[in-house]
Amino acid sequence: MMPRAKTATAFLSSLTLVFCANTFAQSSEKAVKMKDLPEAVRKTVQEQSKGATLRGLAKEVEDGKTFYEAELKVNGHNKDVLIDPSGTVVEIEEEVAVSALPPDVKATIQKNAGKGKIKNVESITKNNTLEAYEAHVTTGSKKSAIKVDPTGKLISAEKEQAEKGEKGEREDTRKKTKMKKP
């Protein structure tokens, strides 16, 4: 092999290794059972799951911080609750019907979806405050996410690449991980 080709191969291999290590370090998730949760987290899960079906539990580490996630089914729609080790609810992602969206939010999502099909929309609540709505859209074989604030202002519209393992966000990782039943 020529010296230049060896250098290029070594560089690309190193770059791939760094990328993979960085993605793993940013977010990792492991299915857990109710008995494995810290007491404060277990109590919060029990409170949040009243009247709901508990679909799964996970322990995840994001940027060195540990969180627990409860996947619920409430009145026929999905609700994911992210909890810190002290039992505090950090974030709630809850499926919302397009017809139930505020008019300005619905209009912005539909405009940005174009000819794509809106698969689902989730409200994102942090610290008891509605922060955004996120729509997942499919256009042919391409998937994208549209994030809109509660007033209908576009926050972001981006392609999702989770299927190819190129995006390390918690939500996309969660969808690929099978969670254990409690």
Image (spheres, rainbow, N blue to C red):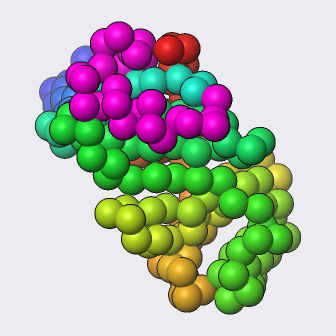
Q: Is residue 24 visible?
A: no
| Nearer-the-camera pick, 21 or 34 | 34
**Residue 41 located left or right of residue 154:** left
Percent across and percent down for residue 67 are: 28, 36
Percent across and percent down for residue 82 are: 38, 43
Residue sitting at x 45%, y 31%? 46
Percent across and percent down for residue 18 are: 20, 33
Rendering quarter of residue 112: bottom right
Q: How many marks?
A: 0
Residue sitting at x 38%, y 65%? 128
Rendering quarter of residue 114: bottom right
Query: Compared to 164, does 128 lie above or below?
Result: below
Residue sitting at x 25%, y 31%? 40
Q: Quadrant of the N terminus?
A: top left
Query: Compared to 108, does 44 lie above or below?
Result: above
Query: Compared to 98, does 68 lie above or below?
Result: above
| Magenta stretch: includes residue 2 | no
Q: Which residues are magenta?
A: 29-53
| Nearer-the-camera pick, 110 or 19 | 110
Q: Is residue 157 visible?
A: yes
Rendering quarter of residue 50: top right
**Residue 25 located left or right of residue 138:** left
**Residue 74 located left or right of residue 98:** left
Residue sitting at x 60%, y 25%? 55
Percent across and percent down for residue 49 are: 53, 35
| Magenta stretch: includes residue 52 | yes
Query: Compared to 51, does 115 lie above or below?
Result: below
